[in-house]
Structure formats: C-alpha cells, structure tokens
Image (cartoon, coloured by chain):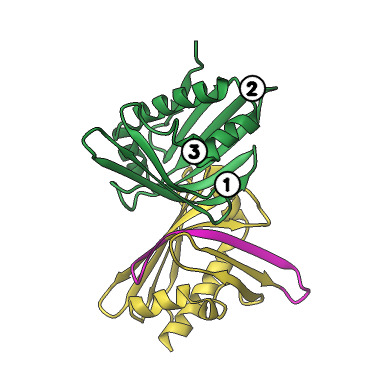
Chain colours: A yellow, B green
C-alpha cells in the first residue's frame, strides 16, 4: 500500500502545495529527484516517456525535459535553479513551454522523519489566474503518477 | 518634475507590484536595467554604493550585487534569470542574502507608451508572511531611490 500524495490549492491564492512521504531517507529521495538518469525513470505521467535533456542541479544551473506520447507529441518543461541544498531544499523556476510566460517558483523541502522522508513542494504563480490555469491543465494526474513511480524507485 | 513610482501590495496576498513610467524608449530602459555598468549607477538606496559582481542577463544566467554603506556594512542580493526577452520582459528570482530562503520571483515588463516606457515589476513570494517581511524591511525607500536614479540616467 503506497503513501498518498496530497495536493492542496486554497481558492483565491496563487499557491499549490504537494506533499508525499516516502519510505526512504532524504539522501535517497534527493538523489532520485536531482540525478538526470533517475529523474527520467519517474517524472511525468505513466503514458508518456520522459527525456531529460539537461538537469544541472546547482545554483545557477538549468534543467529541461520533454514528455512524449506514443504519437510523438511533445510537452516541454524548463527552469533554472536558485538554491540547491543537498538532501534538504531546492528552489527552482518551472515553466511548461506549452503555456509560455506562466512561470512559477517551486520550493522543494526534504524533511527527515527518521529514515522516512516527507517531500513537500510549494509552487507559487505570478497570479491566482495562472495558478488556476495550472490546476485546470490536469497536472494532478501527472503529479500522482510521478510520485507513485518515485516511491517505487526509492523504496525498492 | 519626475514621474511617481507606485508600489502596491494588497493585504493578504504574496504580491508586490511596482510601476514607473520613464521618458525614454523601452530599449533605453531595458539596457539600463540589464547592463552591469549601468545598473551600478542606479540600483540601491542613495546612501549606499552598488557593486555589481555578476549580471549575466540571459536565460540560465545569474546575477549578484552588493550594496555597501559608509561603514562597509554589506547587503548582498542574488538571483537567476529564467526569461530575458530583449526590450520586453525579464523573469528572475530574487534573494536578499540577509533574509536567506525568502526567495521571490520577479516578472519585469517593459511597455512601449510611444517613445515613453512603463516598467512594471510583479514580485511573488512563497508566502504572504514572506511578502509582509519584505515590505517591513524598508524596501520602499530603496525602490524609490533606485527608480529616481534610473529616471535621471535614461532621461538624460
């Protein structure tokens, strides 16, 4: 029985909070979330492939990845890293290039629960409308699939 | 008589909006806001010096500058650029290293008013509390000084 992923988005705010506990250490979860070869194994909805083109997880580094469906349709994402504190915290920008200009700032924290780990992401958007558009895009499906795959990877 | 700088921060939101019109073209204002030698001439409160250590205004680039008072006390700032669209828009992170972890995302837009330019910055913080702390820091003084100096520079 896997742990649940909680997605919280209070009406009228520009925030989305995503929380998940993993049966693995912060070091294990952090590595899976910052190593390009490992990211390719879990990031994105199940029905899409993930090609990590760049993932330079250091302050000032950039990342870029693409999800592709069976027809070859591409969904491109990119961002830059502001903070990378090993096993503790990452602050990065996030943009879905299919909705250009709606850039959010993500703060990802890894909390040690004694061998277990809570991974929490707060995303903040430049407007409530941009946040609502992200919610309406079906991101919940991708997040749930991604975190279930990440759990399988780090809990194996 | 110089144009006013408007700072808007609705209670209970994580946003700060700063708007100013300049008697100069978007190209002139954009250059003054992205060229490190020019930035050093206007960014920061009047009573502090500004040393631009890095200002690599391109997607994935970083910036870093320091304000110093007469006693040598330093106020350090840094961030990374997500978007740099010449004469139009910049999206960047912003951190005052004296309040580490309170990173905001700034969207700066340059609107052509027919030879004149409206420069608008929306900052969004990871929480309302972080936004309120920034407002309480006295940033208004620094913003007003900076924009008055920028106006003198581009309107000369």
Q: Nearer the viewer, residue A26 or A150?
A: A26
Residue for badge 3: B37
Of B37 and A52, nearer the camera is B37
| Residue highlighted by disc 2 | B116
Specify whether residue A102 is in view. Answer: no
Mark 1 closeness class: few <14, some 14–19, many ≥20 residues within 10 Å:
some
Where B75 sits versus A78, above or below?
Answer: above
Residue found farthest to the front: B37
2 or 3: mark nearer the eye = 3
Q: Nearer the viewer, residue B15 or B148?
A: B148
Answer left or right for B66 relative to A79. Answer: left
For label 2, the crowd category at 10 Å Cα-Cα, with few meaning under 14, some 14 to 19 and many 20 or more, is some
Residue at image location 44% in from the left, 65% down from the top? A58
Q: Write down the quadrant of residue B72 in the picture.
A: top left
Quadrant of res B24: top right
Is residue B151 something one can see in this rendering?
A: yes
Q: Which residues are magenta?
A: A69-90
Write down the residue under mark 1.
A130
- The x and y percentages for residue A17 are 43, 58
Figure quadrant of residue A53? bottom right
Judged by depth in the image, the label closer to the viewer, 3 or 1, is: 3
């Amino acid at each position: 029985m896997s742990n649940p992923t909680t997605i919280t988005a209070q009406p009228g705010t520009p925030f989305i909070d995503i929380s998940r506990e993993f049966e693995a250490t912060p070091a294990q979860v952090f590595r899976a979330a910052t190593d390009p070869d490992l990211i390719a194994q879990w990031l994105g909805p199940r029905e899409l492939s993930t090609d990590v083109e760049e993932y330079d997880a250091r302050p000032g580094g950039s990342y870029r990845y693409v999800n592709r469906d069976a027809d070859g349709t591409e969904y491109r994402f990119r961002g830059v890293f502001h903070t990378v504190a090993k096993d503790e915290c990452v602050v990065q920008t996030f943009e879905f290039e299919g909705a250009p200009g709606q850039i959010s700032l993500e703060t990802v924290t890894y909390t040690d629960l004694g061998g277990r780990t809570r991974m929490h992401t707060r995303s903040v958007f430049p407007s409530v409308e941009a946040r609502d558009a992200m919610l309406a895009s079906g991101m919940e499906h991708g997040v749930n699939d991604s975190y279930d795959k990440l759990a399988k990877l780090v809990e194996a």
